[in-house]
Amino acid sequence: MDSENKKSFIPKAFNKSMGIILAISVLFIIVAAVIAYNMGNNNATIELEGEKITLEEIKQQITAYEQEQVEHQEKTAESKAEYEAKKQELDELSEEYREVKALVRRSDELSSQIKEIEQSLEQKDSEVSSLDAALSEKQSELELLTNSIVEKKEEPRVLSAGVFTVGTDLPAGRYKIEPNSGSGNYFVNSGMKTNIILGKGDSFYLSEYIMAFSDGDEIEATLPVKYTPVE
């Protein structure tokens, strides 16, 4: 074996020997400590890592370490319980948030529906107002027509069923025409100017009719008709 191999081998062998010696020393110390404890010699001392320490001090350190472990476990349990409580509180708050969010969404939907209904009501109100205005206008027209129909002081004239000429058989003018008796058809200028059915007692017939006659109009009636001059 050359010199270099010898140099590398010696430290390895030395380290191995030192490890064995150290292990034996530690074992001896432990055995001595156990023997001293069993003998009740709490004042026995051992040298550990260059410092002398009694068995009682070792017991105290072990007790302190165990107490630290118990306190650590208690703190860990308290932290875990606090974590679980906070987690449960967070879950409850999350559920409340989801419920509130759903209520807000439903409120928005209802607000949108209410707005649509209000717009529809406004449109209906506008339509009703237009209809009311139209009705008022028609009523005004009706009142105007009703009030304008004023019978003249002239005596009414009755023409039997037949064909007549305005200007010859009946003076031109505005008349209220009524069936004198019975019911039947009434035409002026072959129905181009007037085409009605006069009669009484049935909604199918007209009981009176207002019209203006001009000279040359040709009247054709299938029933006797009374002509009352009106303004």
Image (cartoon, rainbow, N blue to C red):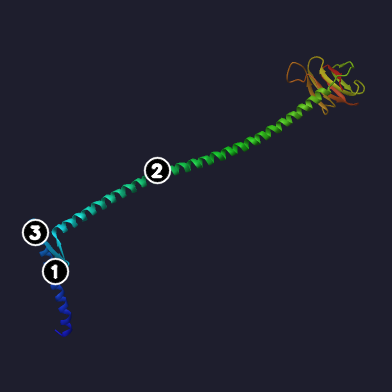
Q: Secondary structure at mark 1?
A: helix
Instruction: Determine contact: label 2, label 3, CB under 8 Å.
Output: no
Where is residue 65 drawn, in percent x and y?
Answer: 21, 56
* Residue occupying image coordinates x 60% and y 36%: 117
Q: Secondary structure at mark 3?
A: helix
Q: CA distance from mark 2 to mark 3?
A: 61 Å
Rendered image quadrant of residue 157: top right
Outermost residue on the right side: it is 168
Of residue 110 and residue 54, the one placed in the foreground of this image is: 54
Sequence order check, earlier mark of 3 and 1: 1
User: Picture quarter containing residue 215?
Assistant: top right
129 horizontally vs 44: left or right: right
Q: Which of the two labelled residues, at mark 1 and mark 2, occupies the earlier sequence position?
A: 1
Front: mark 2 or 3: 3
Q: Residues within 10 Å of mark 3 (few under 14, many from 20)?
A: some
Where is mark 3, residue-wise?
Answer: 36
Q: Which residue is mark 2?
A: 92
Q: Which residue is mark 1?
A: 22
Report the residue that reaches farthest toward the bottom. Answer: 2
- Looking at the rendered structure, the kind of residue marked 2 is Glu
The C terminus: image quadrant: top right
- Mark 3 vs mark 1, foreground winner is 3
Q: Nearer the viewer, residue 102 or 92?
A: 92
